[in-house]
Image (cartoon, coloured by chain):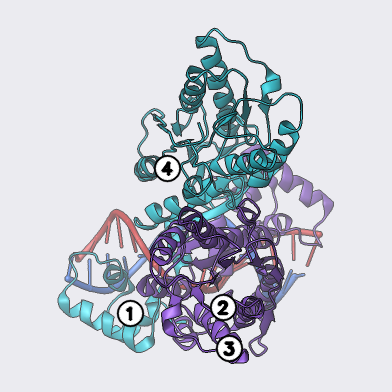
Chain colours: A purple, B cyan, C blue, D red
Amino acid sequence: MPTIIDISHVSGVSKSTVSRVLNDHPHVSIESRQKVQKAIQELGYVRNTHGIQFRLQATNHIGVLVPDVEHPYFSKLVSTLSQSLGSIGYQLVIYQTQLSREYEKEVYARLLRREMDAVIIAHSQLSEREIKECIGSCTAIICNEAMDGEFLDVFRLDEEDAVFQATSYLLSRGRRYLFFCMDHLTPLQEKRWSGFQQAHQQFGLSCSESQCYRGVVTMEDGYALGEQLFTSDQVPDGMITGSDFVATGLLRAAKQRGIGVPDKMSVIGFDNHPVGCMTTPELTTLTNCIPDMVQDVTQCLTQRLKGMQSAPITKTYKASLIIRNST
Amino acid sequence: MPTIIDISHVSGVSKSTVSRVLNDHPHVSIESRQKVQKAIQELGYVRNTHGIQFRLQATNHIGVLVPDVEHPYFSKLVSTLSQSLGSIGYQLVIYQTQLSREYEKEVYARLLRREMDAVIIAHSQLSEREIKECIGSCTAIICNEAMDGEFLDVFRLDEEDAVFQATSYLLSRGRRYLFFCMDHLTPLQEKRWSGFQQAHQQFGLSCSESQCYRGVVTMEDGYALGEQLFTSDQVPDGMITGSDFVATGLLRAAKQRGIGVPDKMSVIGFDNHPVGCMTTPELTTLTNCIPDMVQDVTQCLTQRLKGMQSAPITKTYKASLIIRNST
DNA sequence: CTGTTAGCGCCTTCAT
DNA sequence: ATGAAGGCGCTAACAG
């Protein structure tokens, strides 16, 4: 494999000049430039990224922490992030935690070792303080997870408000026995539950922990929960879910158990996934904020990697309720 | 940032010994080991991955080429690959081509520059020969795409057989006017179309290009196609699709247009995604082979990266038809 | 078991 | 506009 030294020999200039040509520096004579380019052609030279990364102590790789990219929300997020970061020269490396705290810490250890230039945390099982302790002065941005922004930049949906909107809407339509399903247990999901509770409070109604189901993530989970719930003697008149997929599973179970939607029961999804338009009835849902969030995260990240030292930035986005036929 | 030199000073051994401790080499006295570990503690030393990668000329990063990770098939594939490779110390870097030949070539250029140790090609717009020309002696494995295995290792579903099975099944049940929808135009999709044609041939029936729709990828695409087809005067009595999502869209359109499934028309999906159990009727579908394929790809990749020089390996997996209520 | 030594390929000051 | 020189952090012969 030829190196810039070989190029410098063949082209008759110094390796400094070769490097300058390679990096499009100004103040290189056209003549030198051409000699170098000719030598590059002749020798079939390709730059060795390891040398560059070593010298610059940067990889141009950004890690992203997600529970699992198979989850439609996270695959959308990863797709959008990869596009956005790719367009400015960063590559996205996937780290699927599968909810393991140990694995998550391992990723932060890799960050310390400089295996990546920064990490985007879309899901975490640690507290913001714990994360900060793990990463030291490395760059990390919270994107999606509902941290407080005490130590780190945070970009997130107002989850509390989102579920508050959905819950209030059902309560305002006279529904009185609602159930809520959350995903994996994280700060984000707790905020959602809090929104559920607050809406009840606002209406002067009470609700209890027994109306909250945890660990309901997939279509199958939604279906299984529906099968259980709709054959019990405590059939709800409204369900608020963590994703359109879960809601789809619930609709399926409701149909099989003869529970009319929206007559007897309302169902609200989350994320405005296309699947919500394919169900019968079509799904009322909450929008997420992936496009805006990714854009802001990308910008913030580039600033931080350039060395910007300002206080942590927090930005919150509002969901909107898209009303279709399941409510 | 302390380096192994700092450690060697503090611990009173040479940097070689420090390196040996760091890499768990045998032939290091317990005494030295302890001194080094103590110094590492004291100084808060963390290894610098750039130095290691530079020295070893390896990144432990594997690229994966997909059209888009938002596509459920590819998000499943990426998820499984990431898990499998992660367990043996490789990280997965996403490259979404969005069907761009130029971008794909750019990724191969990065491979040449050693930005990654190898690339897994799950989708390509180039011929196998073109790919080989781009990557030279670098490591690339075809995983999913239907190449011939002339130059590269290939792990793939027998797409022809899969669609042959599906088509034959419908023809054997008396269906006579079938339509086929394919995804993006790639060798893989052409094989599928070929399976469709062969099944017709086997039954002594003819079929024409007009029965083949291209670029039908998402639920919305399936729905739009259904809307178009089912309001025309050429309503098919069977549809074979490239994914369960497309099939779901078709079912939706059929329902809206009053075309009974499976009475008037059969629909067959692909991939055995959970969504196929949530539709009405439940979807007949073809299995993919992601788990087996990923396992074999992982093994092959490690061999290649260890320097194995054997002739290209080709392995083909068979799909099986899962019959539910849409046929 | 340990230390010495020699780079891996590149970028970047500092001269000129 | 160009060249010389130094060094980023680490591993792996090699010699003892």
User: Height in image: B309 above or below A301?
Assistant: above
- The subunit letter for the residue under badge 4 reads B
The alpha-carbon separation of the residues under discs 4 and 1 comes to 48 Å
The alpha-carbon separation of the residues under discs 3 and 2 comes to 35 Å
The residue at which mark 1 appears reads as: B8
Front position in the image: B80 or B300: B80
- The subunit letter for the residue under badge 3 reads A
The residue at which mark 4 appears reads as: B290
The residue at which mark 2 appears reads as: A139
User: Height in image: B8 above or below A262?
Assistant: below
User: Height in image: B10 above or below A7?
Assistant: below
The residue at which mark 3 appears reads as: A198
Q: Quadrant of residue A308?
A: bottom right
Dot 1 and dot 2 residues touching (CB under 8 Å):
no
Amino acid type of disc 4? Ile
Counting residues from the N terminus, which is met first, the one under dot 4 or under dot 1? 1
- The subunit letter for the residue under badge 2 reads A
Q: Which of marks 3 and 4 is in front?
A: 3
Front position in the image: A116 or B4: A116
Q: Residue placed farthest to the right in the image?
A: A30
Is residue B12 visible to the viewer in this orientation of the structure? no
The alpha-carbon separation of the residues under discs 3 and 1 comes to 59 Å
Q: Residue A210: x percent and y percent? A: 41, 80
Amino acid type of disc 1? Ser
- Please rate how many residues cluster around mark 2, counting C-alpha atoms within 10 Å: few if below 14, some from 14 to 19, many from 20: many
User: Height in image: A320 above or below B177?
Assistant: below
- Please rate how many residues cluster around mark 1, counting C-alpha atoms within 10 Å: few if below 14, some from 14 to 19, many from 20: many
Element under disc 4:
helix
